[in-house]
Image: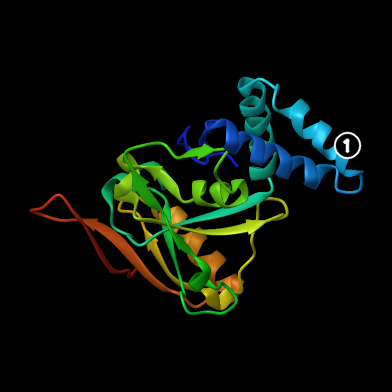
Amino acid sequence: MDFNDPFDCQPAFIFEGSRAERRALARKSADFVHQNEPRASRRRAARQSLVIPDEWIVSTMKASTTHELRRYGVVCLSSKNDHILMWAHYASNHSGICLGYQPSLKAIDLACAFEVHYHESRPIINLVHSVVEQGLFDTLLIKSNQWSYESEWRMLERRINNRQRPYPPDALAYVIFGYKTGIDDQARILAAIDSSGSRPKVFKAEIDEQEFQLNIRPFSL
């Protein structure tokens, strides 16, 4: 995954807990890793794990997390289609397009989209207390509150191929041209829509005459 936010899907890890909690975790881990070995071997492995430096454990988990997150594909969506900054950032400075999808279409299954939550603090996974797998999933849905203007929703899928997720033609509900989308680009996009079998509504973003806002209006040649 490659995001424009360097903190996206990058939790902080700590390894903090009482001696009793650490011993309990060591026994649990040893019982899982050495489950086919005698009890004495499992207890010896648990004792040995207690002397491993915390820094090594945290470093190892960071590497493991990076590897695990690479298995995920993330479809990033927004509940807004008229935000000035997002048109600038994600649509080539207002010269691109915005695609709208049918939320109720089973083939897309937007009902399985998760809302992104915006926090002041970076997510922290305490390796002594947390269920790491759930912590990683939550991490995919937490961003800095500086990104809250995006009103983002995400669809998450493991082991997605080639970073692409195909959709049927009737999934496309509408297309919005940016206010600076050129005539030649408009023609190419309309031709691509016709050849795809999609029948979306087509709109164009226009600058409001009095307010700092974009107005989304039906497109006509």
State which quarter of the image contains the C terminus.
Answer: bottom left
Which residue shows up at 72% across the image and 54% down it?
159
Decide: few, some or many residues near mark 1? Use Cα within 10 Å; few <14, some 14-19, many ≥20: some
Residue 80 vs 70, above or below: the answer is: below
Q: Position of residue 205 (x, y in %)?
A: 29, 59
Residue 174 vs 116, above or below: the answer is: below
Residue 18 vs 175, above or below: the answer is: above
Q: Quadrant of residue 147?
A: top left
Q: Secondary structure at mark 1?
A: helix
Q: Quadrant of residue 122?
A: top left
The answer to which of 30 and 57 lies nearer the viewer is: 30
Residue 109 vs 204, above or below: the answer is: below
Camera sees residue 72: yes
Which residue shows up at 73% across the image and 54% down it?
161
Q: Position of residue 20 (x, y in %)?
A: 59, 36
Q: Amino acid at mark 1?
A: Ser
The answer to which of 92 and 133 lies nearer the viewer is: 133
Q: Which residue is mark 1?
A: 41
Q: Position of residue 40 (x, y in %)?
A: 87, 38
Q: Is residue 95 left or right of residue 25?
A: left
Q: Is residue 180 left or right of residue 158?
A: left
